[in-house]
Amino acid sequence: MQKELNLSKNQKIIFDLIDKSGGPMKAYSILFNVQKKGIKAPLQVYRALDKLVEIGKIHKIESRNAFIACQNSSCQVSKATAFSICESCENVSEISNSKLSKYLSNFSDDSGMKYSKYNLEFFGLCKKCKSK
Amino acid sequence: MQKELNLSKNQKIIFDLIDKSGGPMKAYSILFNVQKKGIKAPLQVYRALDKLVEIGKIHKIESRNAFIACQNSSCQVSKATAFSICESCENVSEISNSKLSKYLSNFSDDSGMKYSKYNLEFFGLCKKCKSK
DNA sequence: AACGTTATGTAATAATATAACATTTATAAG
DNA sequence: CTTATAAATGTTATATTATTACATAACGTT
């Protein structure tokens, strides 16, 4: 059963755009791209983005103020996210590594704080950019 | 030998403010607080922030668009940062856990990408907020 | 002193995100 | 099927965060 079926009109338009783009997209670039579909105002975009983030269909790349479709089909909620970001070409991909996620989900320090969520961003040069 | 001695006038004013605040500060709040010291424009603040981030005196909390003084005296460059963020009171503290940093610094996946930097943000409720 | 580098000052503007309010559509309960 | 409620939409205005462009000044080397 796919969550996509539950998406509203605007949510679906915006999710499809991000998903098809294959990479991170910024809010105003999304806006520009969906104006022909009748979505005219920033708030319409941000509301759809908020909802899509909430249900885990997309993630926000915080360091880039951009949004990327979730590449992990089993991920329903965005409570544990990790990304690799190329600082040269800005390619982003979601890391799904069960050892990493297990390690971070179970992480606790001496602060007495129980973490319910994390977001990790790795930076470096991707294979292509490194060989240039 | 302290890096602080090398700071320029504006950098020192802004670092001292953030450091004394004990928590994360936002750029325009910093601007407001340093206007009496002659720093009048956003750009003056952002330039100092950029430099302070670059040399590792402060870190940016990406999910909050805020800046916090580095709480790890040995940290000279911001290549490996981890924070715990309370989603209720917005308290932020830097995590210095050698096992965690070792694990993440050595992390590699099958993408062929070598990571030179990471930033991790944990979210949850701090002790105080949990007990409310 | 001459040079290159780093920092500063200032104005304007770009990019990112939210508030407030009115209306419509979808979902569920009786 | 209709009433109630929640979720989504539409629209305008505005708040917040960050950068461009250009001119000048201070600092560190040789």
Image (cartoon, coloured by chain):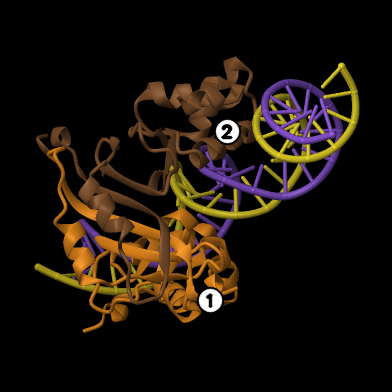
Chain colours: A brown, B orange, C purple, D yellow
Q: Which mark is residue A109?
A: none
Q: How many marks?
A: 2
Badge 1 element: helix
| Residue type beneath disc 1 | Lys
Q: Is residue A92 left or right of residue A35?
A: left
Q: Which mark is residue A48?
A: 2
Q: Residues within 10 Å of mark 2 (few under 14, many from 20)?
A: many
Instruction: Say which chain tag 1 marks.
Output: B
Q: Residue at x 52, y 32 (%)?
A: A28
Q: CA distance from mark 1 to mark 2?
A: 33 Å
Examine the rendered structure and indicate whether residue B71 appears above or below residue A28. below
Q: Residue at x 28, y 67 (%)?
A: B55
Q: Residues within 10 Å of mark 1 (few under 14, many from 20)?
A: few
Badge 2 element: helix
Residue B69 in the image: state x and y as whole percent: 39, 73
Circle 1 sits on which residue? B128
| Residue type beneath disc 2 | Ala
Q: Nearer the viewer, residue B1 or A113?
A: A113
Instruction: Say which chain tag 2 marks.
Output: A
Q: Nearer the viewer, residue B110 or D22?
A: B110
Picture quadrant where residue B129 is located: bottom right
Image quadrant holding the N terminus of chain A, namely top left
The mark closer to the camera, 1 or 2, is 1
On whether disc 1 and disc 2 are found on a single subunit, the reply is: no
| Residue A111 appears anywhere in the view | yes
Picture quadrant where residue C10 is located: bottom right
Examine the rendered structure and indicate whether residue B6 appears above or below residue B67. below
Residue B88 in the image: state x and y as whole percent: 56, 65
Residue C18 in the image: state x and y as whole percent: 64, 48
Q: Are marks 1 and 2 in contact (CB under 8 Å)?
A: no
| Residue B48 appears anywhere in the view | no
